Amino acid sequence: MEVVWVLQWTRMLLFRGKLSSCGECLHLNFSFAPLKAIFLTCYGEGCSVSATANSPSEGEIFYIERNNNNQVHIKLITGAYLQVTVRNLMTADYPGKPGWDDNAATFEMMIVANDLHGDYQLANGYGHHQAKEVLKKHRNSFITMDDFKFLYSHGINTVRIPVGWWIAFDPDPPAPFIGGCLKALDNAFSWAQAYNIKCIIDLHAAPGSQNGAEHSASRDGTTGWPTSPEYVSKTLDVIDFLASRYATHPALLGIELLNEPSASLVPMEVLVPYYKQGYDIVRKHSTTAYVIICQRIGNADPIELYQANISSHNLVVDLHYYNLFDAYYVNMSTVDNIDFVHKSRGAQLQALNSANGPLVFVGEWVNEWDVATASQTDYQEFGRAQLEVYNAASFGWSYWTLKNDRKHWDFEWNIRNNYLQLGNSTNRNIS
């Protein structure tokens, strides 16, 4: 688990890293982030420590010594220990090696758990070797060919597969990410082809994160993608890698250029040029693959993507429909939720289907809501309403997700336990 340590002296510092034991003390390397994405830096003995670095490099690496009483010493990689003798000033000039008594180089520490649980935190928390074993076991067992057999037997014709940007660097992606996801994607394509199922590759995590969420592999809740031309360029390289690798594969249906960019943090001035360049890159490798562009999540109208004039050939707009994650839905009853799906979502889909532009894809939805007392019959009616409405989308729908530790998010569990009844649904996809 990734942790946030709070050092209490004359100020508070936040930093992140992995704990590793060495007897009575813990020794480890860290980069400090007192502010999101702004790191502490100090370039030599006697320097003052300041929060001025945008990314951690050698000058932003600190060595931590911790005893069993939740006390720590902090030193530079050159060996100089940090101390605080004046309020709001930390310097790398403590004379010699500090003891664990009451001195200016000994800090009290408490640990607060980080609520992010994404790829970054898993790999960073376990460390490379253990994370490699954990992910290898997961990838070999979580999704198998039997799952594609299950999907085929229930009429599912497409899978939407989320991937992270580091897949383009497999088998040795940048730290802390772990290789192996490219082989897993290759396996999925092979299994899909065996059962005549198509694949959508969904770039779920872009460099720097496009929304600050754990599922976009944000390091610490920050959203760095839209403010970094380097990140945007690297993302286009990833699209080029994926398109070139899978363009001629019989199972490829389309490539989604970016999942859930944040409406509040990713301006259209950044997103639209990226979508246009990404579209051209896919077209360089395939004239038939669908190019999917996701709506911005938050307070954004998907019509903005129809007005962006990105292209007219095999372009799809992805909408994500959840009766969750917003106070608006909290006090809704079963009837309220079903009416909202029919009236609000149905009207929006009808309007977008009628627009002269991209196809419409309900790329994520789930048979879950905020109705705490819902019965199985309530879930069945809610699921039926969603299927009736989302079947009207011109490019179909995709359920989030195939398997999950929360049962109502688990498509297979819903089907096996009769909470979701597909009936005569068409245009079926699964994430």
Image: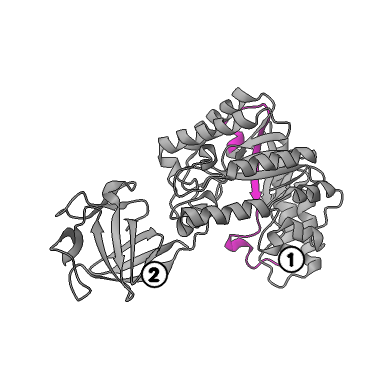
Residue 414 placement: quadrant: bottom right
Range drawn in magenta: 305-333
Q: In the drawing, does residue 151 fall left or right of residue 207?
A: right
Tell me how far mark 1 sits from mark 2, CA to CA. Answer: 41 Å
Give the answer, above or below, for where 375 lies relative to 204. below
Horizontal placement of 268 versus 27: left or right?
A: right
Q: Could you say which disc has been placed on residue 31 in the image?
A: none
* Residue type of the residue flagged with mark 1: Thr
Residue 134: x and y in percent read 56, 57
Residue 111, labelled with which disc? 2
State the residue in front, 30 or 132.
Answer: 132
Residue 339 falls in image quadrant: bottom right
Residue 92 at what x, y percent from top left?
A: 18, 58
Q: Secondary structure at mark 1?
A: helix
10 Å crowding of disc 2: few (<14), some (14-19), many (20+)? few
Q: Position of residue 258 (x, y in %)?
A: 56, 40
Mark 1 vs mark 2, foreground winner is 2
Using a 10 Å C-alpha cutoff, classify the residue at mark 1 as few (fewer than 14 neighbours), some (14 to 19) or many (20 or more): some
Q: Amino acid at mark 2?
A: Ile
Q: Residue at x 45, y 50 (%)?
A: 176
Badge 1 vs badge 2, beta-carbon distance below 8 Å: no
Residue behind mark 1: 334
Furthest residue in direction front, as rendered: 23
Res 352 visible: no
